[in-house]
Image: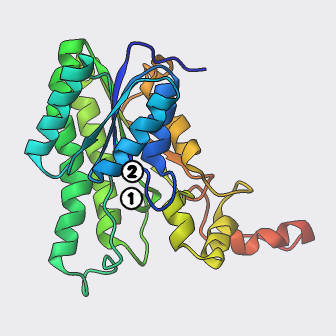
Amino acid sequence: MTKLEGKVAIVTGASLRDGGDNIGSVTASLLALAGAAVVAADIDAAGAERVAERIRGAGDRAIACGVDISSEDAVRSMVETTVAEFGSIDILHNNATAVSDEDIDPVTMSPDVWDRIMAVNTRGAMLCCKHTIPVMIERGGGSIINTSSGSGLSGDVQRTAYGASKAAVNMFTQYVATLYGKHGIRCNAVAPGLTLTAAAKHHMSEEAQTMYLRHTLMPRLGMPEDIANAVLFLASDQSTFITGQIIAVDGGLNCHRPFVAEIAPWASTGAPRA
C-alpha cells in the first residue's frame, strides 16, 4: 500500500452528510490509513468532526476544522491550526465544492449564484494555496491536488457556473505547478465523472444513473474510492515526477465521441460506422 507516514494532509470538503460519504470524507480516511495526519475541513463543522472521529476510531490521527474556504481569515486560521497541531503541511486536497440547483444558464442565472460558486470553487482553491504554499516551501515541497470535474472539460446544458469554475481550476492547477515546481511543489487535478456519493445517490434518479452508465465505458459508475485512490497516488512519493496534469477519473465518460453510446449496439451486427 502507498505510504504517507510522517506526512500531514488537509482535505477540504471532508464531511459526512446526506447520510454517508462524499469524495472528501473517503479521501481523508484513505490518506489517514496510509499514515498521514489529516485535517478534515468543511463548512459543516459537525460533519467534519464525524470524519475525524471515524479516523481516530481506527487508530489514526485527525482533527476537524470548520471553515468557509471563501473567507481568507478562515483559511488562514485553518492553516495555522494545522501547523500548530501537526507541525507542517505536506498535502493539500482542494476538494470543497459549491453547486446550486439555480445554476442553469447565463440568461436565467442570478449573479449571486455565479458569485457564490466562484467564491468557493475558484477563490477557495486560491486561498488554500496562498496560505499553504509558504508552509510547504519551508518544508521543502509538497503536493496539491485540486478536485476538478468533467464539467470543466466540455460543455453541458446545466451548471454553467460550476463548469466554468472547474475549467478555471484546471488552469489554476497548471499555473501553480509552473510557479512553484522549482520549490518542490507539485500541483495536479483530478476530474471526476459522475461519482456515486451519498448526495448523488440521494438526489439522482435511477433513470439518470442509467443514462450516465450508458455513456461510461466501464461497466459501472464511479465511487468516491475511485477518486480517493487517485488523490492518494498524487499525494504520494510514487508520483514525484507528475505535475501540472488534469487526470480524468471518470470511467472513460469524456474520452469518446459523443454518439458512441448510440452506435455501440451496432458493433456486433456489422453495421457500418463512421
Instruction: State if disc 2 and disc 1 touch (CB < 8 Å).
Output: yes
* Residue 116 falls in image quadrant: bottom left
Residue at left 42%, top 78%? 157
Residue 258 place in picture, x, y as percent: 59, 69
What is the spatial separation of the Cα atoms under label 1 and label 2, in whole angstroms?
A: 7 Å
Residue at left 21%, top 36%? 129
In the displayed structure, does residue 71 sit left or right of residue 161?
Answer: left
What is the basis of the colouring in this image?
rainbow
Residue 203 place in picture, x, y as percent: 51, 72
On the question of residue 190 being in view, the answer is no
- Kindly identify the amino acid type of the residue bearing the numbered disc 1: Gly
Asked which secondary structure carries label 1, the reply is helix
Residue that extends furthest to the left in the rendered view of this protein: 73
- Kindly identify the amino acid type of the residue bearing the numbered disc 2: Ser
On the question of residue 219 being in view, the answer is yes
Residue that extends furthest to the right in the rendered view of this protein: 269
Residue 156 place in picture, x, y as percent: 43, 73
In the displayed structure, does residue 78 sit left or right of residue 148?
Answer: left
Q: Number of callouts in the render?
A: 2
Residue corresponding to mark 2: 148
Residue 201 is labelled as: none
Is 27 situated above or below 185? below
Is 128 situated above or below 136? below
Is 110 situated above or below 87? below
Residue corresponding to mark 1: 152
Q: Nearer the viewer, residue 263 or 248?
A: 248
Residue at left 42%, top 69%? 155
In the displayed structure, does residue 240 sit left or right of residue 204?
Answer: left
